[in-house]
Amino acid sequence: MITTSHGILAYWFNQFLNRRLKTKVHAFFIVLGSVIPDFFHVANAIIGWLYFNTLGITWHSEFLIDTSKALHSFTVFTIVFTLSYFLLLLIRRRGFYYGRTVAFFCGWGFFHILIDIITHRSMTWPYLWPWPQIPMHGFIDHLHPLMIVIEIVVTIASIVYILNKKFSQRP
């Protein structure tokens, strides 16, 4: 999916949770967790594009590519989530750290990795990285023109709705 679509999907799920659970789930951290895995991949592409257009040099960073692979990996997600969870249990501090940390991991694991597995038919990530790649092809191709149009329309409509809601609440 387009990176912003991960964030929009996470935002709408957050709204659903807030209505169903009658509690405040932290939208910012769910959205942040859902877009962070693509950040290093996009940064690599932007820096490479700038280098090529300004200096005529082809450039890419193995560090950024490996970081992006790690953030798209269920293996890394499971290890980091487990360590963070047990660290939070040792600290035994609820509130600020606990709720936001769980929201971030919800965004990362559910709204990025799982959505990528479903929607990446033609382009697969190494979801079990650093172990040997087992190709996992999704059911839907996120590069299909119809899928791109749907994502763009939903993203624009969501941004208009969110901005309208935000500015209409001010007195």
Image (cartoon, rainbow, N blue to C red):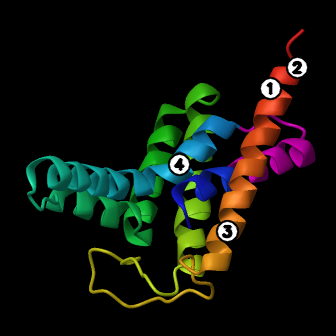
Q: Which residue is mark 1?
A: 166
The residue at which mark 4 appears reads as 33
- Look at the picture and state if 50 lies above or below 27: below
Q: Is residue 159 visible?
A: yes
Instruction: First in sequence, mark 1 or 3: give its number.
Output: 3
Q: Which residue is mark 3?
A: 149
Measured in 3D between alpha carbons, the distance from the residue under mark 2 to the one under mark 1, in whole angstroms, is: 6 Å
Bin the neighbour count of mark 1 within 10 Å (Cα to Cα): few under 14, some 14-19, many 20 and up: few
Q: Position of residue 160 (x, y in %)?
A: 77, 40
Badge 2 marks a residue whose secondary structure is loop
Identify the magenta region: 11-25
Q: What residue is disc 2 on?
A: 169
Q: Tag 4: Cα neighbours inside 10 Å, few (<14), some, or many (≥20)? A: many
Q: Amino acid at mark 4?
A: Gly
* Spatial CA span between label 4 and label 1: 22 Å
Tell me which residue sits at (52%, 41%) in the image: 89
Q: Earlier in the sequence, mark 2 or mark 3?
A: 3
Q: Is residue 10 left or right of residue 165?
A: left
Q: Are marks 4 and 2 in contact (CB under 8 Å)?
A: no
Q: Secondary structure at mark 1?
A: helix
Q: Amino acid at mark 1?
A: Lys
Q: Nearer the viewer, mark 1 or mark 3?
A: 3
Q: Amino acid at mark 3?
A: Val
Residue 66: image location, x then y, percent: 24, 63
Q: Are marks 1 and 3 in contact (CB under 8 Å)?
A: no
Q: CA distance from mark 4 to mark 2?
A: 27 Å
| Pointer 2 with pointer 1, Cβ within 8 A | yes
Within the magenta stretch, is there residue 17? yes
In the picture, residue 5 is in which quadrant? Answer: bottom right
| Residue 79 place in picture, x, y as percent | 39, 61
Disc 3, SS: helix
